[in-house]
Structures are given as C-alpha cells and as structure tokens.
Amino acid sequence: MDYGLYIVTDEILAPGCSHIQIARESLAGGANIIQLRDKRRGGAELYIIAKEIRSLCNEYSAGFIVNDRLDIALLTGADGVHLGQDDIPVSAVRTLAPRPFIIGISVGSVEEAILAEKGGADYLGVGPVYPTETKKDAGPAVGPSLIRKIREKTKIPIVAIGGINLSNTRDVIDAGADGIAVISAVICSPDIKIASRKFVQLLSGKPSVV
Ligand code: TZP
Ligand code: MG
C-alpha cells in the first residue's frame, strides 16, 4: 500500500461538502488513500457512503480505510480500518479480519508504537505531529522527532497526522514518515483537487505547477 497522500474526510470542517465529494475531489487530485471518518452518522448512512467511496477508490486504484467502524469496513470491502488507543485491540480485530486486511493504529509515543506493531498493526498513525484545531482531544503536538524515534524502533509504515501542511511535509518525510494524513489543509482549501495535487507533487519531489 502506498501511503503517500492519505486524506481523512471530515464533513464538519467542510460544510456543504459531503464525504463522497471530498473523496472524489481528492482522488482526482491524486490522493493515495481515503479514510472515511464520521463520528456522528449511524451505520445505515455510513454503509451507503462507504460503499460509494469504495467504488470511487477502485476507479483510482486508491486504498480505502474506515475509521472506527470495523463492521462498515468489512461489509463494504474496505482495505482496512483505522483504530485509536481506546478502540478494540488489534489482536482481537485480527481474528475477524485476517491479512491482507489493513489495521492502522493511532499512536502518540514510542511505547504505543511498539505495542501496536507487536499486536499486529499494519501501519501507525503518528500524531498530532503539529498543533491542530481539527481534533480537540488530540493531545500535545509530538513533533517530527517522535517520528524519528518510532522509525528507529519499528518497521511498519508510519503515517504522520496533525497540522500537516505544504510547509512542513518535507520535515515529516525526512523524519521517516511513509505518508501524510491530511484533513484541514486539503478540505478547508477552496479547491480540494488542486490542494491534493500540490501535496502529491511535493511528495513526488516535483515542483508545484499549479
Ligand atoms: N488525529 C490526530 S490529529 C488529527 C487526527 C484525526 C486531526 C488532523 O487534522 P488536520 O486538520 O490535518 O490537523
Ligand atoms: Mg477511533
């Protein structure tokens, strides 16, 4: 899985823009993975939205991950689920969802990262790397130095999250991240497709032409 540009959908930050529109635009801009993240809707609505994003991601050969909802992920053929520290343990999820199903775990310390890897996680969401307004309970910013420390102690891919923008992307990649998970820097921009494309160009090392 190419973690590259990993877009997390958030309808609250983008009023009038649905999960599906966010996914469609960011995929058109070259996003590698879409994570459906919705803490409000029930399963009935989420199931329909997830099925639609699954087929959009297929069109672009992109990955599709569902936040929190293992049931929705399994029922809609998602590539994986993303879980936090308070969610069902990775080892238990694995019994229901063998590989190649992907399990991503949010971690905020080296200890959590080592445990997640040992438990069977496929990638680590490390953050918040920088201060962010998007997740109020995200805790203090850990900085790119934590990415460096986790890279030394673990082998699975690292996706940096929290306050990632065009100016700090290089620093997190240089620190050892395999990809960047972005919400506001893409979703709150006037054009999600163009904003995504700028990140993709930056990640590919090419100068931005937009
Ligand atoms: N988990 C840790 S920070 C964060 C999440 C979901 C929010 C990231 O959003 P943004 O807008 O890219 O800072
Ligand atoms: Mg969660």
Image (cartoon, helix red, strand yellow):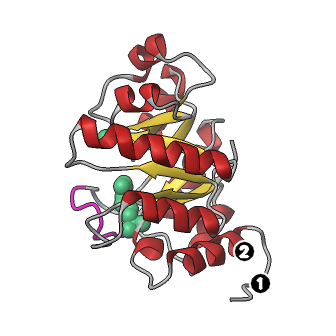
Q: Residue at x 68, y 89 (%)?
A: 210
Q: Which residue is mark 2?
A: 201
Residue located 72% across and 74% down the image? 201
Query: What element does badge 1 sit on?
Result: loop
Q: Is residue 143 above or below residue 114?
A: below
Q: Is residue 176 visible?
A: yes
Q: Position of residue 125 (x, y in %)?
A: 48, 47
User: Quick check: 38 above or below 51?
Assistant: below
Q: Is residue 95 left or right of residue 1?
A: left
How packed mark 1 is, by other alpha carbons closer than 10 Å (few <14, some 14-19, many 20 or more), is few
Whether 52 is drawn above or below 184: the answer is: above
What residue type is disc 2 on? Gln
Toward which corner of the image does residue 132 lie, by quadrant?
bottom left
- Based on the picture, tell me whether residue 17 belongs to the magenta stretch: no
Q: Secondary structure at mark 2?
A: helix
Residue at 55 percent across and 16 percent down: it is: 98
Can you tell me whether the CB of the residue at mark 1 lies under 8 Å from the nearest atom of ligand 1?
A: no
Number of marks present in the image shown: 2
* Residue under label 1: 207
Q: Pointer 1 and pointer 2: residues touching (CB < 8 Å)? A: yes
Name the side, left or right, on which 94 lies relative to 48.
right
Distance CA(mark 1)–CA(mark 2): 6 Å
**Residue 142 numbered tag:** none
For residue 137, which quarter of the picture? Answer: bottom left
